[in-house]
Every structure is written in structure tokens, then in C-alpha cells.
Image (spheres, grey):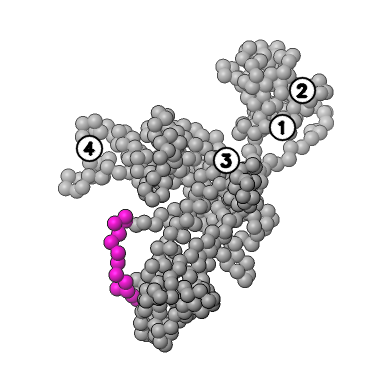
Amino acid sequence: MAITSANGIDAAPRKQTLNSNYVDFTSSATEGWAQQYLPDLMEQEAEVYGKRTIAGFLAQVGAEEPSASDRVIWSEQGRLHLAYTATYNDNNTDYTIVNDVDGNAVGANHGIRVGDMVIMSVAGATAKGYVSAIDPDDDDTDQIRVIAYGAANMTTALGSTATTAGAVRILVIGSEFEKGTDGRSAANAPKFKSHSNKHIIMKDFYEVSGSDAAQVGWVEISGEEGQSGYLWYLKAAGDTRARFSDYLEMTMLEAEKAVDGAGAIGGTDQSINDGTEGLFAAIETRGHQSSGVTGVNAATDLAEFDQILATFDQNGAIEENMLFVDRGTSLAIDDMLASMNSYGAGGTSYGVFDNQEDMALNLGFSGFRRGSYDFYKSDFRYLNDKGTRGALNDTVSNIRGVVIPAGVSSVYDEQLGKNLKRPFLHVRYRQSETESRKYKTWVTGSVGAMTSGKDVMEVHYLSERCLVVQGANNFMLLN
């Protein structure tokens, strides 16, 4: 027995609890309809905790798309240019490739070839050289031989620091070949990284006994959209639905994949719950984290943001970014920007803040520009509310905010077989031609629905979804 949306409800000619005339006023699809036609429907409870729900964050920064498979797989482009860290081997010319610039082990899978012109650098010097051989000693293909342009050898050009383990950075800048020589003997294949995430199933339900069926409320409508008759609703079911909607969002933020040997997949209870990758886990694994220059609070001075800018310069360099932060960090950013005002020490100027003498003083900022980057700041209720992350005790590594790039990224979708423009952040939910598991709601029991012998009415909620974080190297957590 499925409950239809507001656009599909049909009033019953008499008071009957049918699936066709159930109206859920906590559903976003029904809320506007209720406000338009039934503004005085229910008595309102005192909102002593304000707006209790935290849902809406993902709707602001991402999108939702259907998916027909258990797992979502996508590919992200690698860096275009070749840059590596290397360690000195011998002969003042031979070096062993260790990692790429992102810290991934490369070894023999590097892309440097004979004929490449390279820049080599250490802490105190930079020199240019020519790659004359790969595997010069015929014992290991992760070794290269570089002859110097400006000195007898690279050790002379760079100094003794070049012989320190792991101290050399190598960047390919081009190539040089003699007249009449053969072309390249090997090609570099495009580099890409493949990522995946799996859907998880989330459930909840609300139950009311048959004896308490008086909680069912009735609404009589007449002439609205050509309908007349009765609709019914469950006032107390609203909290369950609102809480479940929050859980959908909180799970997409907080979930993590179980690691090998973890109790979630290999414990004594033999559980098979292996989790999914949420936003915070994706950034911790593939993105960046900043704990602030002072180590006390993130993003409290321009030096902190200069470090953030330098990190973004090394990655996608997305110029527009959203800052979702907790209250302490939000105020710290306001104070930081206010201190940039030349009148900040002796008073508050009106022009800079767009304030006037006869208006309330506005000391808050919604955004600012630093270098070529724009940051738009917004309070993140999830990090403040004492019913959510605002209640955590961790004062050292707790998350104080997240920087999310605005716009879209181009990725190769392995299911569709082509490049697509997609938001950096979006939710995938299971859907086929016959079944949508984005947000299912149905009623069972013996009250109204009469689908079982239980003397109860149960309202069930289910969703199957996962989060896709594309280009996590453009995201940053503020710890």
C-alpha cells in the first residue's frame, strides 16, 4: 500500500483511511499544497529548539540522480604533466623515481623517457638536465640517468643536498633530439583514477496502535482542484519522517567504508555491513584538511587562507568556493575580516560594512575575495546543533567546517561510456523502470490498510542511496 504524493491524492466521499486519501504534511511535495489550501489545519507545537531538522545542505551544493546498479563507478583525470620525487642513486647522474607529486608510489610506472628535458630541484637549488637513459644499469626500470646542461653533473649543479634520500623533485618540461634520429620508442598512456561507491539501504517506521487510531486527523476539502471529500493524516508521524529525512543527509555526510578486518565486516557477529563513503570520509581520504596556522581554530587569519589558496593552486584551482562552518569559525572569519578595516582598532567605519548611524550595526560577512578565489560563507547548522555534531566532545580533531567548490566537473561515466558534466557533489539513488527507491513510504497493519493481523498502523520509510564526491582534491575540511 503506497502513499502517493500531494499531486496524486484523491479525497474520499466519507471518512475512510485509504492509501489514496492519505496526506503527509511533512513531505516537501505536500507542504506547499497544505500551506496554500489548509493554512489552519493543525495546532502548532512550540518550537523551543527552533528548526529541528538539518536537512537541506546537500540540496544547496549538489544534485540527485538515479542509478540502476548496486555500485557507482566513475573515473577522474590524472595530472597532465609529469612530476615526481626521486632519490639519488649513484654516479652523480642516476636517480630512482619514488612517488608522484601527490605522494602515490610510482616506481617503474613513471612516464619519463629518453630524450626528456627536465627541471631538477632541491631545497636550495634548481638545475636543468637531459634524460640520457632509462635503467642505465640494466637492473631496475625505476632508475633514470640525467646529465646536466649547466655543470659537469647534477650533483655539482644542485649541490650535496641532491644526494640526500628523497630530496629531489623532477619535472618534465619538454624534449630534445639530434638531427636524423628516430622518434620516441614508447608512448605515455593517459593517467586516470577510478573510484566507486556503493548504495546503502536505510529504513525507519512509525507505529500507532489500533486503540489509538483516534490520532488520525481528518480534513474536509471542497472544490480544491476539482476535489471534494475527506483526507486523513497522522500528526505524530511527522517527527518520524523529518528525523528519517535528516538521517538520509547525515549518513551521506558521515558514513565511511569498513576496512579489512573491521568488526563491521569480519567480527564475531559475521555482519555484512561494509558501509559507504560519505562526504567527510571522501575528503579525509582523497581531499585536504586544515587545522589552522595556530592549531587552535581553523580559518582565523589570512595566513590560514593563504595556505588554503596554495593548496587549491596545486589542484583544480576552482575559483568559487562555499564555506560551511560552525558558529565559532564563522565568528572568527568575521573578526578576521573586520580586522582588515583600517578603523577597526578605534571604532567601526560605516562605509566598509555598509552601515549607517541610524541602523543596526552589521558585523557579519557573507563572503570575501582573496587572490583569485571567492569564498561564500554560510553557517552549517549540523555542526552547531547540540542534537547533532554540536554535541561531540572532541575539541582537537572535530570538524569545524568544510570548503566545497562551486560548479561542475567533467568525468568519464563508465556506465554510459562518455564524458559528462556533473556537480562535484551529488546523491545517487536506486531506480529502475518499475521501482524508485529514492524515498519510499507505505502503510501496513490492520488500521485502514488491513494488510496484516497486527492491531496497529505502521508507516514505513525506505531509501537506497550513496554519495558521489567527484574531484575530492578540490575539497577541504577545517578541523
Which residue lies under the disc numbered 4? Answer: 348
Please name whichever residue, 154 or 330, is drawn nearer the observer in this view of the structure. 330
| Secondary element at tag 2 | strand
Residue pictured at 65% horizontal, 59% vertical: 69
Q: Is residue 458 above or below residue 122?
A: below
Rendered image: mark on residue 279:
none
Examine the image and state in which quarter residue 337 appears.
top left
Rendered image: mark on residue 132:
2
Instruction: Reply yes or no: does residue 47 show up in magenta.
Output: yes
Q: Is residue 1 above or below residue 129?
A: below
| Secondary element at tag 4 | loop
Amino acid carrying label 1: it is: His
N-terminal-most mark, 3 or 1 = 1
Crowd around label 4: few <14 · some 14–19 · many ≥20 (10 Å): some
CB of mark 1 within 8 Å of CB of mark 2?
A: no
N-terminal-most mark, 3 or 2 = 2
